[in-house]
């Protein structure tokens, strides 16, 4: 069995209170945990989302042979990927979080993730948001 990887198009942007400065450890220059806007609402989304996927695909290619597939039952892992964008809008992976913080507004994303894992639609119809998970294809980097 092959491990499948997906990216979530409706992620969140956070931002620091001040632009990053080399060598500064002041909290105002560090990325905050406060959400700023949905990724799809960001003015640079169409340009940056494909770049984010390329960076993630590069990491996946490097670790794929080291990951174990559990074939006896459906399972999943949720990772959060934090990017820093430079002045030329090149994304750099700052960190990958194994257990990213989830809030109430993330329920549609989590329901859609379970739909993928269980391979059946169980997301409540009352959820109006349409979460979009996009499969990361081999060789996308």
Image: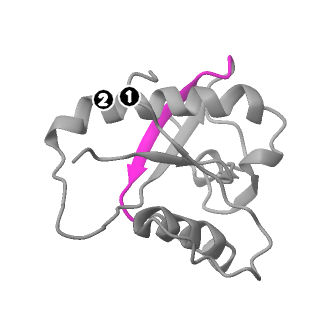
Seen in the picture, residue 85 relative to 99 is either above or below; the reply is above
The residue under label 1 is: 138
Q: Which mark is residue 61?
A: 2
Task: Give the colour scheme of this rendering.
Answer: one colour
On screen, residue 121 versus residue 5, left or right, reads: right
Where is residue 125 shown, x and y percent of the image? Answer: 73, 79
* Range shown magenta: 88-99
Seen in the picture, residue 35 relative to 94 is either above or below; the reply is below
Q: CB under 8 Å between callouts 2 and 1?
A: yes
Residue 22 visible somewhere in the drawing = no
Q: Give the residue drawn at x 60%, y 61%.
A: 33
How would you rate the neighbour count of disc 1 (Cα within 10 Å): few for under 14, some for 14-19, many for 20 or more? few
On screen, residue 30 versus residue 95, left or right, reads: right
Locate residue 84: give its quadrant: top right
Q: Give the residue drawn at x 44%, y 32%.
A: 137
Chain-order first, disc 2 or disc 1: 2
Residue 124 visible somewhere in the drawing = yes
Which quadrant does the C terminus fall into? top left
């Amino acid at each position: 069995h092959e491990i499948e990887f997906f990216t979530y198009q409706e992620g969140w942007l956070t931002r620091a209170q001040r632009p990053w400065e080399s060598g500064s450890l002041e909290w105002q220059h560090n990325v905050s945990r406060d959400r700023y806007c949905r990724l799809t609402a960001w003015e640079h989304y169409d340009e940056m989302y494909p770049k984010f996927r390329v960076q993630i695909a590069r990491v996946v290619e490097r670790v794929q042979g080291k990951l174990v597939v559990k074939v006896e039952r459906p399972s999943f892992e949720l990772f959060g990927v934090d990017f820093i964008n430079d002045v030329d809008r090149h994304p750099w992976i700052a960190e990958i979080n194994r257990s990213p913080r989830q809030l109430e507004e993330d329920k549609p994303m989590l329901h859609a993730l379970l739909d993928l894992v269980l391979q059946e639609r169980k997301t409540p119809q009352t959820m109006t948001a349409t979460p979009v998970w996009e499969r990361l294809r081999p060789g996308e980097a």
